[in-house]
Image (tube, rainbow, N blue to C red):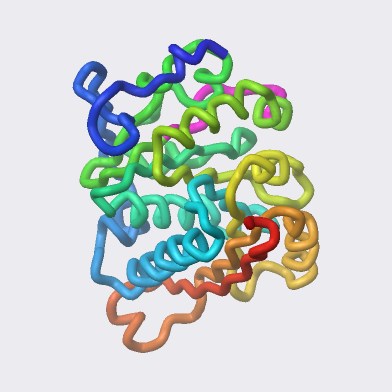
Amino acid sequence: MDSERTRPPAGGGRTGAVGATAPIRELGVKTKYLLAPLHDPLSPQTEQYRAVRARIEYLGRIAGKPVQIIVVTSPSPGDGKTLTALNLAMVLAADKARDTLFIECDLRRPSVRDYFVERPRVGLVDVLNNEARLSEALFRPTGSRLLVLPAGGRTHHPAELLASPKMQRLLQILRRRFDHVVLDTPPVIPLIDADTVAAHADGVILVVRAARTARRLVRRAMGTISKHPIIGIILNDIKPTPIDRYYHPYGYDYDYRYDRKKNG
């Protein structure tokens, strides 16, 4: 992979991820009400994501190194991992002292495009295939500091592409340029994509949908990712309390487990 083709524009922020030489495109948000940090930054849902951010920072302190690259996955399709990952990335990006990138690594069923008014032209697949520069593939949701790298073009070999040396080198470059990189990966069962990408991440978050995701699938998923540092489980779509319902019809909860030995 040509490192020059993956280099973001220089300038701006700690990482040099944003600059004036190649302005980052802005895309309007189509379903803004689903993105709590944009729609209602004071909502209980946004506060839950801030709590996750605080826990990520805490885990970095006790491990002695920052938790930069974060894989977000789920046991099965429909658990809400992409929306959860986007919301978490937006809350991480709200810290003006830090640069955050969201990467759509679900190359099999990309859905990030559904949240924006304009379909992204290129993305991760095109960057890895040397068909686009990273700076050309990035965009910023209107009203957010977050940078997004969508899936991009189609590929017949998603697992191989995510496991390729090109992907590994890209993550190494991004680790130097961003404080946080949130990777939205396919479900753990029955695919290997998330497990492959997690080998190069600092931690994994498992998203589970309340009253929908079977416990046996959660156990299988935890067994699959147990060899990687597990940040914790986010339980979403929980039944809101009356005060939560007053603010927003979506609920979130979370739990954490982090193996210090795997990160020390």
Is residue 151 rendered to the left or right of residue 94? right
Q: Residue at x 64, y 35 (%)?
A: 108
The number of numbered badges drawn on the structure is: 0
Image location of residue 120, percent across then percent down? 39, 28
Q: Is residue 258 magenta?
A: no
Which picture quadrant has residue 177? top left
- Farthest residue, direction bottom: 242
Vertically, is 5 above or below 164?
above
Q: Height in image: 22 above or below 147? A: above
What quarter of the picture does the C terminus occupy?
Answer: bottom right
Q: Position of residue 15 (x, y in %)?
A: 34, 34
Residue at horizontal 67 percent and vertical 50 percent from the top: 187
Q: Quadrant of residue 169?
A: top right
Q: Main secondary structure of the magenta part?
A: loop
Quarter of the image containing the N terminus? top right
For image coordinates 43% across by 46% down, the residue present is: 180
Of residues 246 and 158, the one drawn nearer to the viewer in this rendering: 158
The relative height of residue 142 versus residue 17 in the rendered view (above or below) is below
Residue found 76% across the figure and 55% down from its top: 227
In depth, the one of 142 and 15 nearer the eye is 15
Which of the pair 10/217 is nearer the observer?
10
Which segment is the magenta one?
Answer: 149-158
Q: Is residue 111 left or right of residue 27?
A: right
The image position of residue 189, as x and y in percent, is 76, 52
Q: Is residue 213 above or below residue 5?
A: below
Which x, y percent locates residue 24? Answer: 27, 27
